[in-house]
Image (tube, grey):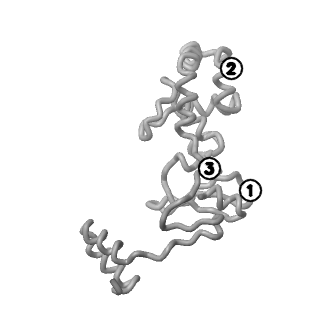
Amino acid sequence: LATMAFNDGVDVDIYSSDKDLMQLCTEEGVSPKINMVDPFRLSRTTHKEVFERWGVSSNLLGDLLALAGDSSDNIPGVKGIGPKIGASLLNEYGNLEAVLEKAHNIKQKSRREKLIEYADMARLSRKLVELDRNAPIQHDHILCNGVTQIRTANLDKARILNFLDKMEFRELKQKTILKLGRST
């Protein structure tokens, strides 16, 4: 959806703290732009913050996660390569494939051997962290003909209120009734 909006010329703020989505942040000066907003801290993450945090640009974050792994998402990565070493390798060689192709040139024996031994795991990890930027948007309650045309279907008030009852969200149910009206 963010890529669709970007392609339609719309600036995008992604409300998430998921580091995988940081791959979508656009570089400074690109317009339209994609940034992230952490919904808990209400802080903005731009390309600059991605680079400051990870040591690589947002378009290389997937490569970094493929090298370093990500235990929270069960991404194995390359044993012995963490984010700092991964960032230095990517900054030196340019991208994951270049690191793996030139692994035999790396001076540190242990690092070189691990990159060679776990090259296939790194490639698999890269596939696992890749975001599908062209995933179709189809849902019974969303009508979509381009991002600027997204509309939700009419809300099923009874269904929403029944769900809130079932989940025992009493306060949220009362607020919802005030917003939607009690015509159920």
Q: Looking at the image, is mark 3 or mark 1 earlier in the sequence?
A: 1
Total numbered labels? 3
Q: Quadrant of residue 177?
A: bottom left
Element on which disc 2 rests: loop
Mark 2 Cα shell of 10 Å, populated few (<14), some (14-19), many (≥20): some
Above/below status of 175 relative to 66: below
Badge 1 amino acid: Val
Badge 2 amino acid: Lys
161 sits left or right of 143 in the view: left
Q: Looking at the image, is mark 2 or mark 1 earlier in the sequence?
A: 1
Q: Which mark is residue 77?
A: none
Above/below status of 19 relative to 146: above
**Residue position marked by numbered label 3 in the rendering:** 133
Q: CA distance from mark 2 to mark 1?
A: 31 Å
Q: Residue at x 68, y 20 (%)?
A: 102
Q: Residue at x 34, y 79 (%)?
A: 175
Instruction: Single out the mark in the foreground, 3 or 1.
Output: 3
Above/below status of 86 relative to 27: above
Mark 1 Cα shell of 10 Å, populated few (<14), some (14-19), many (≥20): few
**Residue position marked by numbered label 2 in the rendering:** 102
Q: Quadrant of residue 11?
A: bottom right
Q: Residue at x 57, y 45 (%)?
A: 131
Residue 71 in percent (x, y) is at 42, 36
Q: CA distance from mark 2 to mark 3?
A: 29 Å
Q: Which mark is residue 30?
A: 1
Q: CA distance from mark 3 to mark 1?
A: 18 Å
